[in-house]
Amino acid sequence: MIVTGKVVQVSVRPAITFINLDKKYPNSPFACIIFPRSTNQFPDVKNLMGKQVEIKGKIAEHNDKPQIVLTSSNQITVLESATNSVAPTNSAPKPEAK
């Protein structure tokens, strides 16, 4: 499955790393989990803060909330930073100059 969202919280703990999308814990609708055996795959995990991301993996439920366990950095694709994600409204494409 593929899930997209904005990273709003990265919590690095000795036993686990949480990446919460769209809302901070405990209101986050979706979480990504990194266990210690995989943390070396994500050396810059805190740099995901504020970024729009695409997450790939098997969705599981934990405490009635969906999550994906991340084991490889190729499961995360940064789509764009949050500051660049706001598109102008009611804008028409500009014609190309000839």
Image (cartoon, rainbow, N blue to C red):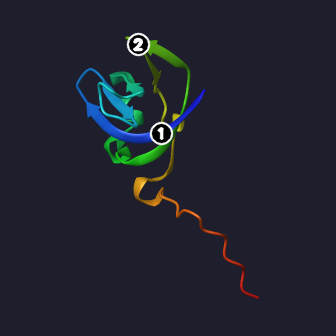
- x%, y% of residue 5? 47, 39
Most distant residue in the top direction: 63
- x%, y% of residue 4? 52, 38
Where is mark 2, residue-wise? 62
Up the image or down, 95 lies above or below 41; here it is: below
Where is mark 1, residue-wise? 5
* The image quarter in which residue 1 lies: top right
Most distant residue in the bottom direction: 98
**Residue at coordinates 53% horizontally, 20% vertically from top-left?**
59
Q: Is residue 98 left or right of residue 4?
A: right
**Residue at coordinates 66% horizontally, 76% vertically from top-left?**
94
The front one of 95 and 21 is 95
Q: Amino acid at mark 2?
A: His
Disc 2 crowd, CA 10 A, few/some/many (<14, 14-19, 20+): few
* The image quarter in which residue 29 lies: top left
Q: Is residue 37 left or right of residue 14?
A: right
- x%, y% of residue 49? 34, 45
The front one of 46 and 60 is 60
Q: CA distance from mark 2 to mark 1?
A: 19 Å
Quadrant of the drawing holding the C terminus: bottom right
Up the image or down, 26 lies above or below 81; here it is: above
